[in-house]
Amino acid sequence: MRIVVLAGGIGGARFLRGLQQAAPEADVTVIGNTGDDIHLFGLKVCPDLDTVMYTLGGGINEEQGWGRQDETFQVKSELAAYGVGPDWFGLGDRDFATHIVRTQMLSAGYPLSAVTEALCDRWQPGVRLLPMSDDRVETHVAVTIDGERKVIHFQEYWVRLRASVAAEAVVPVGAEQAKPAPGVLEAVASADVILFPPSNPVVSVGTILAVPGIREAIAEAGVPVVGLSPIVGDAPVRGMADKVLAAVGVEATAAAVARHYGSGLLDGWLVDTVDEAAVPAVEEAGIVCRAVPLMMTDVAAAAEMARAALALAEEVRA
Amino acid sequence: MRIVVLAGGIGGARFLRGLQQAAPEADVTVIGNTGDDIHLFGLKVCPDLDTVMYTLGGGINEEQGWGRQDETFQVKSELAAYGVGPDWFGLGDRDFATHIVRTQMLSAGYPLSAVTEALCDRWQPGVRLLPMSDDRVETHVAVTIDGERKVIHFQEYWVRLRASVAAEAVVPVGAEQAKPAPGVLEAVASADVILFPPSNPVVSVGTILAVPGIREAIAEAGVPVVGLSPIVGDAPVRGMADKVLAAVGVEATAAAVARHYGSGLLDGWLVDTVDEAAVPAVEEAGIVCRAVPLMMTDVAAAAEMARAALALAEEVRA
């Protein structure tokens, strides 16, 4: 079975680990969000791709869900001693090596997809990890701080400000001109199932769908497309998805997110058992909906969610 | 008193620390060798400038004479895990930060002299540290390995091969087109004394002198130029200067190095007391020569050498 998964960072990565346990024989292609990529200290950092790679490759810091285990911070403290910032983005020494290798390969002319493949040679994530695009896309967020309207990089909004102010608009800058990375459309076209993990519907899955051609390819693939709600009991499972949902005029509820994707894209939707009452509203929108536990407390729980998603896919296929 | 010092790495840096103790009120400008600069992992590494900066700024690894104290090697071990080399150049995590800042500033368009000044803002070395040139100069070495003639980067010869094969030629590639960095010629023209520390006469001081204009400015400065022999008892005090001296047809003796610089450049030369017999040969070449202890066993010994050099400068001035 060929499965395509559109993934952001932590939620996507943890779901993928469950999927690998649930369907060990499946051929999984991950289309990773690169809208939260950022240049720091002259280095190209791809937080979502790395979170997927480290999580599936056994190098992730399990507690925080991003960055490397057994990490140290000598480089960061030295950069601070030089007065070189930003200091709010926590790059560790092990992580720096990834960004150094990536930047060196990009400077040598390799596209991000080739670089990602080379990095994965080491990590052996057990999936084919593709960036959504080799072109630069950068999610920016419009905010008002002290009465002044500003447009800032998504990471500045998310990590520095911790989404403490309202996101007035979320714009994936460059997305309109971006092309899907080599292999992306082919993977979608030959997929048996397409899954949206409980990743952020605006700044993760939404950014991937903003690359022209990807949304259309998914809609026209003619195979079950099943998503899992990142909202449980009217709040994000983790992260601050509610803040960016507001920017696109979507309520932070499991049903509203499903309707935001729409029946033109989604065939099936899983909500948490606490949101069972939302099932009729989703099904009214033409999307088959089931309520199952959606808290990824461990790999077994994530695997159970993946099994439920695959079962729903077979149900809508039939 | 304005003193200009042409410095390579370890020997130059340790001599400078002695000079600072010997002449605490002096205004010291260091013209640093950049011929051993190398791009590693996409980063610009300036080993000699950094050795001077770390040594005078209190950050040097005292035992090895280069690199940072309390160093760790996480980045390097991760790069090796990615299969990305070279693995023979020992960049530590703290040191990486310096190269990251430097590379970022160079990419932003700052010349190396401005970058060096910015890095020195942190280290406060107590001297004005100027690269010999803002232009790229890279010392290459011609060698024959397994019957095949190759031209390799100086660092590959020095660090990877540890000068284990004969250097057939030493070429400072780019030197002919290089211009002295801003401030270099001005510092030489306004110096009261010019010193050549016991740095490598071929790949350190020789490379600086290969930048058009610098040798001429020193020769025409009209002030005492005094050098200290890096060869003691027919062997280099440290490093492998004998290997590269052979490439330029110069014997590895204190007298031969003085004659290699020549009386057109040098007014005074210090040899070690074990080489006292070499004094007449140096003086025959028109260079005033004295024998004093030249082993920099500690800062006090280096200060004593600096005092002897300054005394010899006053002697030749008179």
Image (cartoon, coloured by chain):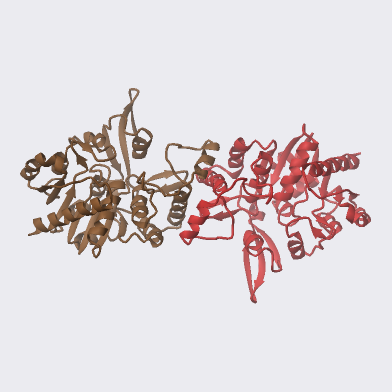
Chain colours: A red, B brown
Answer with left or right where residue A99 lies relative to residue B54. Answer: right
Comparing A267 with B194, the one in front is B194
Comparing A45 with B66, the one in front is B66
Comparing B32 with B110, the one in front is B32
Give x and y (percent) for residue A204: 71, 53
Answer with left or right where residue B8 lies relative to residue A207. Answer: left
Give x and y (percent) for residue B14: 29, 50
Residue at x-position 36% and y-position 45%: B63
Give x and y (percent) for residue B288: 9, 49
Answer with left or right where residue B255 lies relative to residue A273. Answer: left
Q: How many marks?
A: 0
Give x and y (percent) for residue B157: 34, 35
Outermost residue toward the bottom?
A147
Instruction: Using the rendered image of the protein, determine whether residue B24 is visible from the camera's viewpoint.
Output: yes
Query: In the picture, residue A311 is in which quadrant?
Result: top right
Comparing B310 with B29, the one in front is B310
Q: Quadrant of the N terminus of chain B?
A: bottom left
Q: Quadrant of the C terminus of chain B?
A: bottom left
**Above or below A204: residue B139:** above
